[in-house]
Amino acid sequence: MKIRGVQQVKYTRARLIYNPTSGREEVRRRLPAILQRLERGGIETSCHATEGAGDATYAASEAVRRGFDLVIAAGGDGTLNEVVSGLVGHERRPRLGILPLGTTNDFARAHGIPRQWTGACDLIVRGFTRPVDVGMAGDKYFINIAGGGSLTELTYEVPSKLKTMVGQLAYYMKGLEKITRLHPVRMKITANGLDQPIDEELMLFLIANSSSVAGFERLAPDASTSDGLFDVIALRKCNLAEFIRLVTMVMRGESVFNDPHCIFFQSDRIVVESPDRVQLNLDGEFGGMLPCTFSLLPSHLDVIMDERGQSSYHYGAGGRIAGSKRKQDADGEDEDGDNGKDEDGEMDVPDDERNDSWRLER
């Protein structure tokens, strides 16, 4: 029965799965405003707060079973990994939205999903999606990066409380602690497209699905989540001085593609073995041990992202750098009442967020 004068609105049913400790606990503080902004955009949203490892995977799988149209992952790369892992095993998979409220947000960075929560909500409301590849590491999943070797364990060894207190600085503190213990490990890498296996001592290997790796956009600049291929980077044995030189180049945004210590190739299937004990990192979380086979599920998830795929860590949701820094209240309204937009209706990006292109992790 229709009531005269009342417009019938069709709402999208969404399940928001959030990590309350991510990104200095921003999502916990912003939750009422986030829900209100999504509701105004026609997205009726219920929530699930994660309580421990694996909980986001269970919640995402349960959201599929309950028939939600959209699942939103709010947190860092680790939360996103768990949500993806809960979606991929189902025949009917809802669209995936992302509120990148962690410390690094690699996948969001590579796909134009704004770090500013208001812009990310507006992007979800607009609802433009693209299918993306999902990586498999044995029977586990990753959407952005897999790796092993020196320093790749940093992201999951830093305590969550320390990240909440000091943010990005926590990773540098841990890195300085471990850098003097760097050592190469014998590894054998076999892959489709390689003429012969790589069998030598390596410092580390990275298998990139997107162009943002640990917050750096020049390590695998041509990597894409829609090309059906991984971009693989392996670092040959080197001394501490050489390692620091290469890391410094990456932090400056310089390419190391032609450096003799680095090996680059593309493949859709990679097998990595080692006689030593080598831990795996999947999207910033512990992913088991070598040996492991890495493969792709092509175009497996429909993810809401920026239509142009521009990096939101340099641009606003509308795709252009906007003006001055704004102060927003808990309802998402800023001090001049324009919802964080400039005179042209574009999303403003605060100065301190524009310079975050070097950040790492969850």
Image (tube, grey):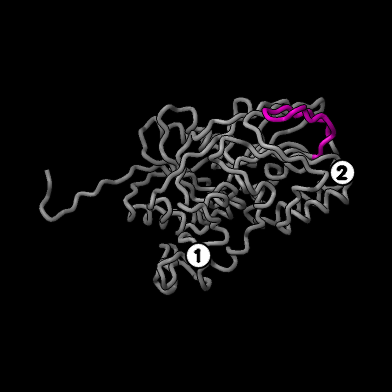
Let me know if residue 58 appears in the view: no
Measuring from the top left, give residue 262's x and y in whole percent.
78, 43
Residue carrying label 1? 320
- Please, what is the three-letter code of the amino acid marked with disc 2? Cys
192 or 321, which lies in front? Answer: 192
Residue at x-position 12% and y-position 46%: 2
Span colored in magenta: 185-203
Per the image, label 1 sits on a secondary structure element best described as: loop
Left or right for 335, reference 187: left
The stretch drawn in magenta includes residue 192: yes
| Mark nearer the N terminus (1 vs 2) | 2
Residue 267 appears in which quarter of the rendering? top right
- Please, what is the three-letter code of the amino acid marked with disc 1? Arg
Let me know if residue 106 appears in the view: yes
- Dominant secondary structure of the magenta stretch? strand
Residue at x-position 49% and y-position 50%: 99
Left or right for 325, reference 356: left
Residue at x-position 54% and y-position 52%: 101
Measuring from the top left, give residue 1's x and y in whole percent.
11, 43
Residue at x-position 60% and y-position 36%: 229
> Neighbour class for label 1 at 10 Å: few (<14), some, many (≥20)?
some
Pick out the residue farthest to the front: 195
Which label was assigned to residue 238? 2
Measuring from the top left, give residue 181's x and y in whole percent.
86, 43
